[in-house]
Image (tube, rainbow, N blue to C red):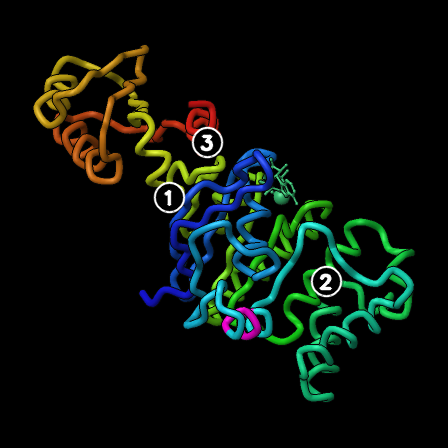
């Protein structure tokens, strides 16, 4: 997969605080990458370095073919990316529409394209009817939606979003998540900062757990798997010795029995569970249900950031 974002040993020090310590990661074209980390982990600082709002103390990042630490590269990057900043950064006295007109013009969009996009995206976030109201009179969530529209106005190939669903009600947050998934379908690349584990798990192809240093980078599934073993929980109509020996013949690990429920340790649930079920059925067992339990992303995350 072509790399769209390539962060190389990015470090940022503020006075005596190291905000971001030597992090390297890449995001492929059409990928949704989540930076997950506690308050003060350096998520916003990372995004600000990627969009050239601040320069790294050392290291650099390449976005498409441009270098963030190069003057001309930085100009191209600013023009090319869409940014949802952590503070909405809109003009309070201007209307929603005029804010978007202003930013659309800054990106040198053709008049027609600009107006079409403003209308399309304001309708998408349900604010078209309120377009003429001053941003200062908007609620936090409404401002956040306008900030998201502003990031999309020039149809950027790369989106950097700092907690895009913060302040949004569950329905609006889902709308934005669906929108992000649709952007991926169009081949756009999205880097999103979030503390919201559920959100990260739902939309991110890969997650980087950040706590000043990058602690782990992987798919949500692999992160869950890496941290603790998984168990298959199989409920049978009846458990007997034949069934237990049949399972032991295909799975050497521990089996716990609780009435008609079996809790079986598995290391690779996708591969091993069907084999176990097969063995049970061949031994004449009747399976009522089969589930998997293991560490949730939340447990994994808490373990990683506490260590
Ligand atoms: N302009 C600045 N001057 C001094 N210190 C800063 C500055 N910006 C960030 N920091 C420090 O860098 C560290 C990382 O901050 P950052 O805002 O990147 O964290 P974050 O992961 O975005 O946190 P949050 O989840 O609260 O948004 C913090 O210790 C913060 O105090
Ligand atoms: Mg932040």
Image marks 1 and 3: residues in contact by CB distance under 8 Å = no
Element marked by disc 1: strand
The first of marks 2 and 1 along the sequence is 2
Element marked by disc 2: loop
Residue sitting at the far front = 15
Q: CA distance from mark 2 to mark 1?
A: 32 Å
Q: Quadrant of ligand 1?
A: top right
Classified by dominant secondary structure, the portion drawn in magenta counts as helix
Figure check: 48 above or below 40: below
Figure check: 193 above or below 121: above
- Determine whether, in the image, residue 65 is placed left or right of residue 176: left
Residue at x 91%, y 56% (from the top left corner): 137
Residue at x 72%, y 48% (from the top left corner): 168
Could you tell me residue 61's position as x and y percent? 44, 59
User: 10 Å neighbourhood of mark 3: few (<14), some, or many (≥20)?
Assistant: many
Residue at x 36%, y 44% (from the top left corner): 218
* Residue 274, image quadrant: top left
- Determine whether, in the image, residue 130 is placed left or right of residue 296: right
Figure check: 32 above or below 78: above
Give the residue number, with chain letter if any, for mark 2: 125
The magenta stretch is 73-77
- Say if the magenta span includes residue 83: no
* Residue 207, image quadrant: top left
Could you tell me residue 134's position as x and y percent? 91, 63
Give the residue number, with chain letter if any, for mark 1: 217
The first of marks 1 and 3 along the sequence is 1
Is 43 or 203 nearer to us in this picture?
43
């Amino acid at each position: 997969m072509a790399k769209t974002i390539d962060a190389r040993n990015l470090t940022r020090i503020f006075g005596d605080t190291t905000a971001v310590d030597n992090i390297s990661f890449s995001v492929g074209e059409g990928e949704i990458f989540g930076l997950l980390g506690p308050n003060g982990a350096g998520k916003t600082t990372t995004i600000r370095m990627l969009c050239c709002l601040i320069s790294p103390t050392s290291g650099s990042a390449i976005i498409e073919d441009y270098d963030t630490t190069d003057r001309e590269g930085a100009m191209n990057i600013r023009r090319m990316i869409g940014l949802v900043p952590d503070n909405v950064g809109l003009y309070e006295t201007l209307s929603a529409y005029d804010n978007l007109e202003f930013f659309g013009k800054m990106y040198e969009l053709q008049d027609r394209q600009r107006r079409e996009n403003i209308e399309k995206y304001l309708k998408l976030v349900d604010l078209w009817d309120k377009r003429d109201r001053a941003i200062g009179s908007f609620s936090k969530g409404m401002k956040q939606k306008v900030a998201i529209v502003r990031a999309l106005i020039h149809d950027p190939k790369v989106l950097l979003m700092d907690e895009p669903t913060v302040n949004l009600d569950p329905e609006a947050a889902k709308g934005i998540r669906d929108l992000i998934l649709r952007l991926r379908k169009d081949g756009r690349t999205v880097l999103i900062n979030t503390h919201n584990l559920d959100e990260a798990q739902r939309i991110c192809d890969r997650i980087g757990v950040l706590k000043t240093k990058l602690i782990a980078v992987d798919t949500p599934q692999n992160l869950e798997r890496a941290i603790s073993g998984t168990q298959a929980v199989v409920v049978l109509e009846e458990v007997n010795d034949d069934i237990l020996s049949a399972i032991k013949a295909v799975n050497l690990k521990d089996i716990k029995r609780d009435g008609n429920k079996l809790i079986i340790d598995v290391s690779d649930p996708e591969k091993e569970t069907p084999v176990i079920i097969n063995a049970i059925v061949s031994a004449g067992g009747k399976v009522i249900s089969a589930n998997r339990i293991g560490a949730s992303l939340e447990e994994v995350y808490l373990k990683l950031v506490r260590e």
